[in-house]
Amino acid sequence: MAGGRSHSKMLPEWCAARQALRSVIIAAAVAGSGSLLMASPGITEATGFGTGFFLTSDGHVVTNYHVIDDVDEVRVRIAERDIVKASVVKTLENHDLAILKITVDRETPYLSLGDSYSVKLGDPVFTIGFPQPRLQGFSPKLSSGEISGMKGFQDDANQFQISNPVQAGNSGGALLTEKGEIVGVVIALLKGGENVAYAVKASKLAALAEIADKLSGQVREQKRKTYATRRKAIAAAQSATVQILTFTDLPDGAASERTNATSSQESKGSEVRYNVRLQNKKTKALHEGYAILGWKNGKAYGGYWLENSPTKYFLTGVRNANAELVVQEITENEVSATGKLSMKIHNGKAVWSGALYNTKDKRSFTIWLTERNPE
């Protein structure tokens, strides 16, 4: 009930639109969906996942800032067994990097920083991570590729473009040479591009270590590790790679409820009804309406319409490496807007929120989709 008002007069339109939208729900890959979790204690309660790696022998872990941003607790899963609480030592938000620290009773295997300035176009690189763990499982996965661009997204000189296939859950993994040296940290993929992903260069990680207390000296002084064969480099990387688990302080039972909501909505053929609020960022004009978001094999396909408007806006979307839903709005068989939405559970209901950018008239909007009560 958007805005607390009744919209029962629109039910015939709703039913007609629902039937129309059912016919266009299509299949694609989903980031992070799945059904029953069969994993060690602590994983089932996690509300987010990522990848990290040890930078020192005393438990300093590198991951992405977006993986640990706006969460209440971070834990690290080591060697696919032990789950240890982590603290945040330092972050570099503009380059999506974070350094964590865990306390363990033994030395941790670590990876050594390489020279990202010596990397050349076409150099082979690999990463190990935990992509889509609820779907693909909780064991580490290898992804191989090459440096496909010396600059990253929109020619960002602080990033590499890489051809490694990465998915949600790979964020924060080390990008490594065939000798096992860190030349980057995986940060994102380009939705719609075939094997187009990005990694922030190791020089930025070195800069972060410089501003973290005593860490840069420790990194320089510890034994530098390189490996004679790719197989040995992969084995070392696997030992030093960890899974990042994040937890959000939701009401009792909300963590499992959030997992179930994602699974049920994104399972094959599932449809969810929403109330919609759309606000023009410049004029603050607010419009309300209805939406249907359907999932089949993980791709979202649905639409929305607003009160007092005859236009129906169709939506398609898939999740990116940051678990955001990257959407396209289609009207009259043309893409009319693009945007990103993120989901949270509020009072037991799924709420999608984010921004839409109208590609025709260059207007920006904030959109909220709030799950409706069953009718």
Image: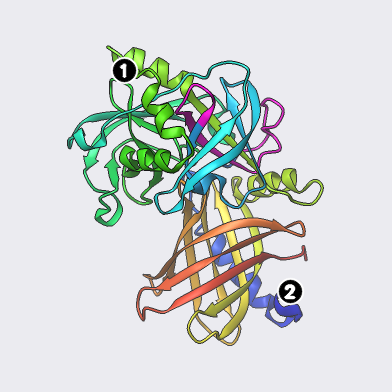
Left or right: 294 as drawn, with respect to 65: right
| Whether residue 105 is visible | yes
Residue numbers of the magenta segment: 34-60
The residue lying toward the viewer, choosing from 47 and 227, is 227
Q: Which residue is mark 1?
A: 226
Q: Residue at x 36, y 50 (%)?
A: 190
Left or right: 66 as drawn, with respect to 286: left
Q: Residues within 10 Å of mark 1 (few under 14, many from 20)?
A: some
The residue lying toward the viewer, choosing from 68 and 100, is 100
Left or right: 7 as drawn, with respect to 182: right
Q: Is 325 situated above or below 189?
A: below
Disc number for residue 1? 2
Q: Is 359 situated above or below 129?
A: below
Where disc 1 sits, the SS reads loop
Q: Residue at x 65, y 59 (%)?
A: 272
Q: Quadrant of residue 291?
A: bottom right
